Image: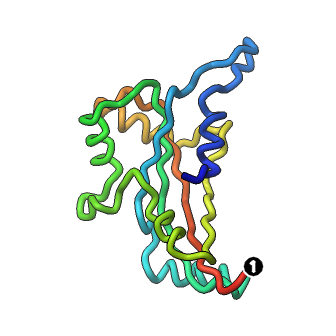
Amino acid sequence: MATSAWDIVATEFLQLVNEDSGKFQEVAEKVIHLYRVSFLQDSATDELLKLVQTKISNQIIGLKTEQCFNIGLSSDISDDKLSVLKWVLGETYEPESLGSESFLNGEKRKNVDVYIIEIGLRLSFTTAWSTNAVSICQACGLIEINRMELLRRYLLYVNGSL
C-alpha cells in the first residue's frame, strides 16, 4: 500500500512541540481517514478542468475530486462510535459516498497516466472548521476526536506525460 503525503504528515501530527516548556505534547494517539466523493458538481468540475488546462497544461484531459477527512483521535474509537462519525460526515441521501478507502486510489490503479494532488491543512495551524467539527463530534458523544481537518483531493487524467 502506497504511503500518502498525509500519512507522512500524520506521523508528525502525533507529537507537537509545546513552545512554553520545550517538551513534546501528545496531540493524537491515532489518525484515521474517511473519504467522500465528488464535492463539486459536474458544471463546476468542467469549469475547473478548463482552468487547469489553461493554467497548468492542456495535456490534462479530465479530473475527479474527493474530500478526505483527517481525524485525530486521543484513543481508539469503537465500531458504534465510528458509525456515528460516518453518519455525521456522510450525506443523508448518499451514504455510500463516504468510505474508509479513497475512491480515487482505485481509479489510479486502473490508469497509468493519472496523478493525485492533495490540498489541505497546515500541520501547525488548527482551522476554525476543525474547531467546529470537533465540537459537533463531541456533542454527539465522540469524545475521542480531538482534531479533524479537511483535504481536497484531485485526480488528474493526463494525455502523455506532463
Which corner quadrant holds the C terminus? bottom right
Q: Position of residue 13 (x, y in %)?
A: 62, 34
Q: Is residue 2 visible?
A: yes
Q: Position of residue 7 (x, y in %)?
A: 59, 44
> Measured along the vertical axis of the image, is residue 123 above or below residue 55?
above
The amino acid sitting under disc 1 is Leu
Tell me how many marks there are.
Answer: 1
Identify the coloring: rainbow
Give the residue displayed 54% in from the left and 69% down from the top: 108
Using a 10 Å C-alpha cutoff, classify the residue at mark 1 as few (fewer than 14 neighbours), some (14 to 19) or many (20 or more). Answer: few
* Location of residue 155 (image quadrant): bottom right
Give the residue displayed 40% in from the left and 34% down from the top: 135
Q: Residue furthest top?
A: 21
> Measured along the vertical axis of the image, is residue 127 above or below residue 37?
above
Give the residue displayed 59% in from the left and 79% down from the top: 157
* Location of residue 140 (image quadrant): top left
Q: Position of residue 54 (x, y in %)?
A: 71, 85
Identify the residue under disc 1. Answer: 162
The one nearer the camera, 126 or 90, is 90
* Location of residue 76 (image quadrant): top left
The one nearer the camera, 64 or 138, is 64
Q: Is residue 54 visible?
A: no
Give the residue displayed 24% in from the left and 58% down from the top: 92
Q: Position of residue 14 (x, y in %)?
A: 60, 29
Local secondary structure at mark 1: loop
